[in-house]
Image (tube, rainbow, N blue to C red):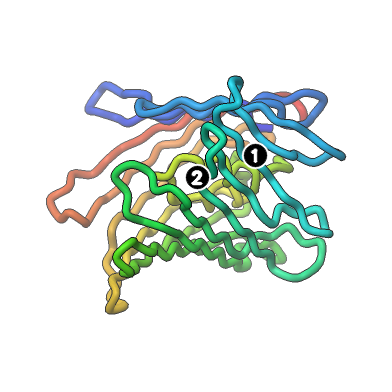
Amino acid sequence: MVTEIVRYEQHDTNQQEINRQTFGYETGRLASYTDQNPDRALSFKFKYVGGKVAYAYTADHSTVLNFDYDQFERIEKASLLVNNKEQTVFSLNYESPDRTTRLTGLVETRILLPANSSIISRTFQFSYQEIAGKTEDLVIQTVQNAYKDGSRTEEEFDFDLSAQNHSPYYDSGQTIVFALLALTNPNEVEIARYLQRFDCQSVTHEIMNTGGNRSLREYSQFTTDFDGNYNPIRSSQQTTITIPTDSPNRYYQQTFQFNCVE
């Protein structure tokens, strides 16, 4: 299981750390999670009830993410509280009304708007396709943004995946929890990576205006090294940004650490 992911931005011969995620486990289950970047740092612990995560909380309990489950023990709702005030509510939808855990939709409703944001809700949709013989994974994520003034925009992420190797979250039993934890950062958009089980080789990011016209925003390619268990150990990313048109290419590196439980 993944224990650390560190992301760097490359600047010529130098690199700057821009994000660090750490995952702690006790007796095989998730016990702690930390997300740190230049703008914020949050560390969560987890309360379990009946073998399921009931809520995630910071050490001072100033930030709490509660989880509600349906009759099939799937997370159907989550709520984010900061200083005992509800900030955001998440509603989750699954592929079929049974025990499947394949997430197909998530609606984020913002009770209190984050600073410098006019988005009142976001609707995420996830599409799955066969990427190899009898192997399916998440290949498309769309996000519909609703604004205070009544306008809407839409984004789409298309993923090229390879079933030959694993994503960092391949053997995690808490991918949906990870996705919801990521959304405690209101600037997070691409949560599909937490739900994917296999190696992502490229991402195409398009935006659609109110008239339905598509524009390519950016395209990213990944070159990744893997260990003997098909887990990533380091990855290089080249991103071509087309909006704004004069944007330079960006380059990133990621490193991954795993524990020895396979």
The residue drawn where x is 60% and y is 66% is: 128
Report the quarter where the N terminus lies.
top right
Q: Amino acid at mark 1?
A: Tyr
Could you tell me if residue 4 is visible in this image? no
Looking at this view, name the residue that lies furthest to the right.
50
User: Residue 18, percent across and down?
Assistant: 37, 28
Residue closest to the eye, 237 or 144: 144
The residue drawn where x is 62% and y is 32% is: 227
- Quick one: SS at disc 1? loop
- Quick one: SS at disc 2? strand
User: Residue 94, percent across and down?
Assistant: 68, 64
Q: Amino acid at mark 2?
A: Gln
Q: Left or right of 53: which side holds 120?
A: left
State which mark lies toward you, 1 or 2. Answer: 2
Q: Mark on residue 38?
A: none
CA separation, marks 1 and 2?
Answer: 39 Å
Residue closest to the eye, 97 or 115: 115
Q: Is residue 210 above or below residue 64?
A: below
The residue drawn where x is 65% and y is 43% is: 177
Q: Left or right of 36: which side holds 178?
A: right
The residue drawn where x is 53% and y is 65% is: 125
Residue topped by disc 2: 87
Report the quarter where the C terminus lies.
top right
10 Å crowding of disc 2: few (<14), some (14-19), many (20+): some
Residue closest to the eye, 2 or 232: 2
Residue topped by disc 1: 230
10 Å crowding of disc 1: few (<14), some (14-19), many (20+): some
Q: Is residue 119 above or below residue 81?
A: below
Looking at this view, name the residue that lies furthest to the bottom.
211
Q: Left or right of 36: which side holds 4?
A: right
User: Residue 202, percent across and down?
Assistant: 43, 53
User: Residue 203, percent across and down?
Assistant: 42, 55
